[in-house]
Amino acid sequence: MAAPATTRAAAWLACVSFASGLVPRISPSNVLIRSYIGSMGFTTQTDWVYAERDTGELVRPSPLDALNPTRTVEDSGATVRFFAAESREGARLLLKEYSSSAASLAAAERSAFERLLTIARARADVGADTRSPRVPPPFSQLVGWMESGSAFAAASFRDEWRTNICCEPPASGGLWLIFEWEGLRTAAGWPAAVRRAREAVPPPGPLARLAALLDGGAERGVERAARDAAARRAAYALELARRMLAAVAASHAAGVAHRGIGPACFGVSGFDEETAPGALRVRLDNFGFSLSVSQAAQDAALARRVALARAEPGGGTSRALPRDPTAPPSSAELCALLERDDLRALGYALLEVLLAVAESAAPPPPPPARSPQAAAAAPPGDGAPAALQSTVSAGMDQATLRRLVEDVFDGDMTRVRDYCAADPRWREGVAILDGADGAPMASAGADAGLGAGWRLLGDLVGDGSDARAIAAAAEYGELRLAARLLECEWFRSL
């Protein structure tokens, strides 16, 4: 909307510019908003550490103690709205409009993308090969930014916006980021896509039933089709996981910690499991909570975490931790904590997606063969408190998974695997994580006996010790942990 008095069927965006930078200002006359897509809210998670008042010794409360939670989640109040748009030349665009309470998220995201773009372009120029097309970096492609102008306050503009865009008009002074249109599919949507594809399969016709009978029986044909579908899902899952980890590794190599990783942060080019896995493109998005190391040095919460890590037994003797507990956090310490947080969140995102896909692909459960009272008394897996069962059955989001893995099973991935394998809904996801190792291990012993995927998850979620994370990062120097994990055994079967 070029001016409040315009009568165009879609709204042209009026704006004023920021100071120019690497990401350019897009002229208002070149952006046409077509439709409102939706909005996204954010929550803030706080991890709590408890210590004895007299001795200062760290203590761990019960995972079911509501008065002493290990973590709390609160609504941040920030909102981002999404719009489909196009340039005057016809190129499709995705717009993000940040509310005034989300202005800091817009600034952080723009800063992160500028850094990512700078490093990606520099590396592409260094390794340029004119014979091969350039591979786009594994991030959403930011092409510009805008700020809502004073024209947004005009009554005629706001009336026309409500009529044509069918949502509340933006307030003046709002911040906008403009991205290339790459679709709306994310890793979070794969389970629903699997469910829709399964429900869309028509029942076999007479000729198909006859062919199945001649080919060894209808039941064998159904079993064979189910095995083939499961194999395709497993191949897609491995490629998806590898590319999600590669995107995080690229972000860390550029010196940017995401700090908000979840399945919805990974855009995917498609859900077609028939396509060759190598054709899948995964891009990391939503950098509103990101930090660079220089920015992290000003974060008081991270400084407190470093101080606590230095106070852990053995922490002060690590070559990664200065002996002086009052020394400012080093860049190595900050990198280790930021990267470990991202990888832990990535591990839970992978587990959440795989369990949801396994449940989506599972056949409808048979009617219970026992009384409702007996069924209610039996947990889906051995060892989880009864108070957690209703939460688990309602959906395995990241908060529930962290509670299960860290608080209930104390990071023991063997027990987590056994818990998941005991529920028929998740057995396909367990099999994918078992990887080339195939058979489940006995419920005892070290994680070395776990399947390759479970070992990767164990490395991602790690143990909760910041001191150990810092020491491990120092051991490998500049070789980032995410890049090392890309060489794991699970991915070698691709």
Image: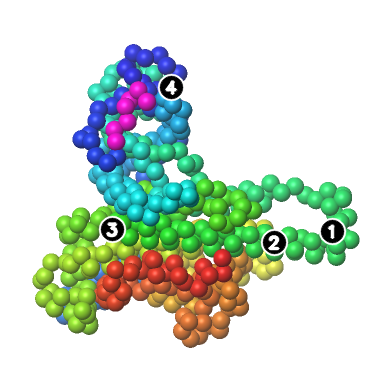
Residue 28 magenta-drawn? Answer: yes
Residue at 23% in and 68% down: 332
Left or right, 43 with respect to 333, comes to right
Quarter occupied by the C terminus: bottom right
Name the N-terminal-most of marks 4 and 1: 4
Where in the figure is residue 456, as x and y percent of width and height?
46, 71
Distance of mark 2 from mark 4, alpha carbons? 47 Å
Over which residues does the magenta segment extend? 24-30
Q: What residue type is labelled 2?
A: Asp
- Give residue 10's mark: 4
Of tags 2 and 3, which is closer to the observer?
3
The percent coordinates of residue 89 (x first, y second) are 44, 26
Measured Cα–Cα span from mark 4 to mark 3: 40 Å
User: Can residue 44 be seen by looking at this rendering?
Assistant: no
On the image, numbered disc 1 is attached to which residue?
212
**Picture disc at residue 228:** 2
- Which is nearer the N-term, disc 2 or disc 4? 4
Say what amino acid the circle numbered 1 marks.
Ala
Task: Compare residues 415 and 457 and report the one nearer the observer.
Answer: 457
Q: Mark 4 near mark 3, Cβ–Cβ under 8 Å?
A: no
Badge 2 vs badge 4, beta-carbon distance below 8 Å: no
Q: Where does the image place residue 420, in percent across and percent down from the top left?
A: 54, 70
Instruction: Name the side, left or right, on which 259 lies relative to 276.
Output: left
Q: Dot 2, crowdedness within 10 Å: few (<14), some or many (≥20)?
A: few
Of badges 4 and 3, the one in the foreground is 3
Residue for point 51% across, 78% down: 450
Disc 2 on helix, strand or loop? Answer: helix
Mark 1 or 3 closer to N-term?
1
